[in-house]
Image (cartoon, grey):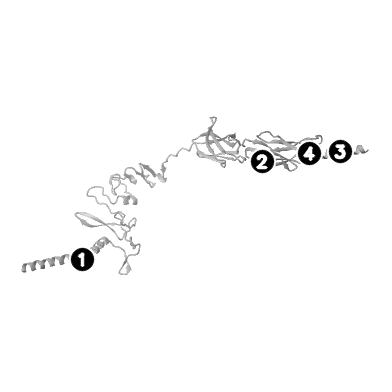
Amino acid sequence: MRRLAATVATALIVVLATAGTAAATVTASVTSPGAKIEGPAAVSVRVDRELTDSVNRVDVRLRRGGDAVWDASLTCGNCGTAWTTSDWGGKTLNPGGLPNGTYQLHPVIDGKEFGGRDVWISVAPSRVSNLKTSVSGQDVTVTWTRAPEPDISGYRVQRRIKDGAWQQIASIGPGADRYAERLSPGKYEYRIVTVRPDGKGGHITVTSSAVAAAVSPPPAPTQPSETSGSGGGSTESTGGSTGGSTGGSDDGSTTATGGTTVQPGGGAATGDPASAEGEGTGGDGPQQAPSEASTTQTSARTAGAGRRVAPPPGVRRSLMLGGGELSLPDPQVAGPRERFYGQDQPFSEELDYGDIDPITGEPRVRDGTATRRVPGAVQEFVVAQLNTPLVAIPIAAGLLCIALGLHGMRWLRQG
């Protein structure tokens, strides 16, 4: 009995000593995924322990630059049959929402993080979605929904004439979702290439499906048409001249061509287009009065030597100078326009006789009351200049000098 008790005590001491040593020798390693991750990958961890050690929880942690970006708790797949080695898993790492690059994957045993292994995430980008084209005249706009990855570098726009070779026409940034251009008529196709860095200095691309865009030729310009009036009258324009007509029972028409006016009833007047008078060349129909615009334009000219022309509205004939006539503005008739002529404006026969002074902008005042300007204001201005003391003083000074000179000569002769 004594020998049996001693043997049992020795065994217990050995077991306790072995258990204390085993607790410090639990190890874990990542067995999946491999060094490169190109899509969703299963994660598994192998744990090695001694017979008397217990492992209650195994986690896996993904780090980048020291920061944890993903954690997952694993389950044991063979804990019921394994004595010292167990495999933990049951989770999938989906790198779709992570930027491409190098990461570290660490196992965590009962809260204690073990050294991990490097993994390289390099996942291709997604294709753009909702790719559409819209055409307005010759302007084509391509729109799309951006790829969801956070590290997209940009987009390449490719175009081809239908069934032709693809050509890259633009490279735009990651925030773009449209592209617009103007094209000549034809049938085209577009597609978008999504560009993403691969995490080690390169790039990964993916190309969308193609969409069509048809640009139609612009409509042909419409030709000007001839317009006919009711009652047989017609309007025709030749060489930039415009003719008007009034339809009637005489079936008359008016045609503006080179200054010739055809009168209703067969009468015609020909002559200089700038003249207010013409010479009758045919017909005995009544003469039609020239339009107001024609009279205003041609009233200042004469059709030939010795021919007198009626003055335009606002101008009257007055003085005879050397056999000629002087046209003065008629204050009783307002001219076609009223303007002030200042220092920087050219002079014309149109004068303003209003109540406002063109220099000060105030009403004209004479003898305490506002008065209107009258013809002859220019002459009044000249007279006012001649009567100013600036003219009288030099004349008086000259006469005084002459008188002093005469007295001086007389004094010298007497001496």
**Mark 1, residues whose alpha carbon is within 10 Å: few (<14), some, or many (≥20)?**
few
Mark 2, residue position: 63
The image's mark for residue 393 is 1
N-terminal of the two: label 3 or label 2? 3
Specify the amino acid type for callout 3. Thr
Report the Cα–Cα distance between label 1 and label 4: 134 Å
- Of circles 3 and 2, the one toward us is 3
- Identify the residue shown where x is 86% and y is 38%: 10
N-terminal of the two: label 1 or label 4? 4
Report the Cα–Cα distance between label 4 and label 2: 31 Å
- Disc 3 is placed on an element classified as helix
Mark 4, residue position: 21
Figure disc tally: 4
**Mark 4, residues whose alpha carbon is within 10 Å: few (<14), some, or many (≥20)?**
few
Report the Cα–Cα distance between label 4 and label 3: 17 Å
Mark 3, residue position: 10
Looking at the image, which is closer to me, 41 or 285?
Answer: 41
Looking at the image, which is closer to me, 14 or 103?
Answer: 14
Q: Within the image, what quadrant is residue 334 found in?
A: bottom left
Report the Cα–Cα distance between label 1 and label 2: 107 Å
Q: Within the image, what quadrant is residue 15 found in?
A: top right
**Mark 3, residues whose alpha carbon is within 10 Å: few (<14), some, or many (≥20)?**
few
Q: Residue furthest top?
A: 164
**Do tag 1 and tag 3 residues touch (Cβ < 8 Å)?**
no
Measured as percent of width and height from the top left, residue 354 is found at 33, 61
Q: Quadrant of the C terminus?
A: bottom left
Q: Is residue 17 visible?
A: yes
- Of circles 1 and 2, the one toward us is 2
N-terminal of the two: label 4 or label 2? 4
User: Relative to 342, is 214 on the left or the right?
Assistant: right
In this picture, is 126 found above or below 406?
Answer: above
